[in-house]
Amino acid sequence: MLLPFCFFGNYTVGSIFTTIKLTNDMDTIVFGAGCFWCVEAIFQQVEGVVEVGPGYCGGSTLNPTYEEVCAGTTGHVEVARVLFDSSIVSFTHLLEVFWRTHDPTTINRQGNDVGTQYRSSIFCTNKKQFATSLEYKKKLDDADLWIKPIVTEVKMLGEYYPAEDYHYNYYNKNSNQSYCKYIIQPKLEKYNNVFGVKKTIND
């Protein structure tokens, strides 16, 4: 049960994310917290998040497919790569959203989604993110907010593989599908109850 607790330069990227003019305030972080459809849908709600892209990382298989990752043999995690504007939303707020919208104490599992591809993970794109994530994790562990210890792995991002096109914006395109209605929608409702709709929080 979850309890409450209180690099880019100026250029255009168009392969992973929608073509967006990036500024020095833009940054990326990669989160794994179960099925990437859920993680994408949640972080799309956060004010200051510019784009969210589902993908795979953390494993050894080159250019993995969704079917291969789902088989649990690649070592990869289903992740969401979050592009955010740090002048609008702080990295620590993103960490709070991450830890409050999934169970970080279950090893290789989120609800009915079971396997190493669903493990709780943070893949950092710079050393400051890495240090901040470890510090935040320790603070949560010390606070004993969960009965079991946090098992979230914190690593530097290695090779990242974008997911197949049909995974992008999945919830918004398939909101009437049973998985979206019974798994993703309750998580979005929980997010909105805790943080409100499009809430902006800065340090």
Image (spheres, helix red, strand yellow):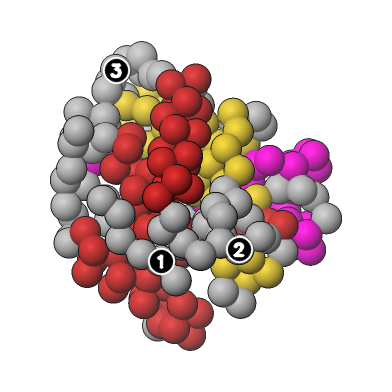
Is residue 36 rendered to the left or right of residue 184?
right
Residue drawn 30% across the image and 54% down it: 5
The answer to whether residue 146 is above or below residue 176 is: above
Decide which of tag 1 and tag 2 comes sooner along the chain: 1
Percent position of residue 7, x then y:
41, 19
Magenta-highlighted residues:
48-72
* Whether residue 132 is visible: yes
Asked which secondary structure carries label 2, the reply is loop
Quadrant (top left/top right/bottom left/bottom right) for the N terminus = bottom left
Disc sitting over residue 106 in the figure:
2
According to the picture, the residue beneath numbered tag 3 turns out to be: 24
Residue drawn 80% across the image and 39% down it: 60
Figure quadrant of residue 145: bottom left
Asked which secondary structure carries label 1, the reply is loop
Figure quadrant of residue 148: bottom right
The answer to whether residue 176 is above or below residue 199 is: below
Disc sitting over residue 143 in the figure:
none
Disc sitting over residue 2 in the figure:
1
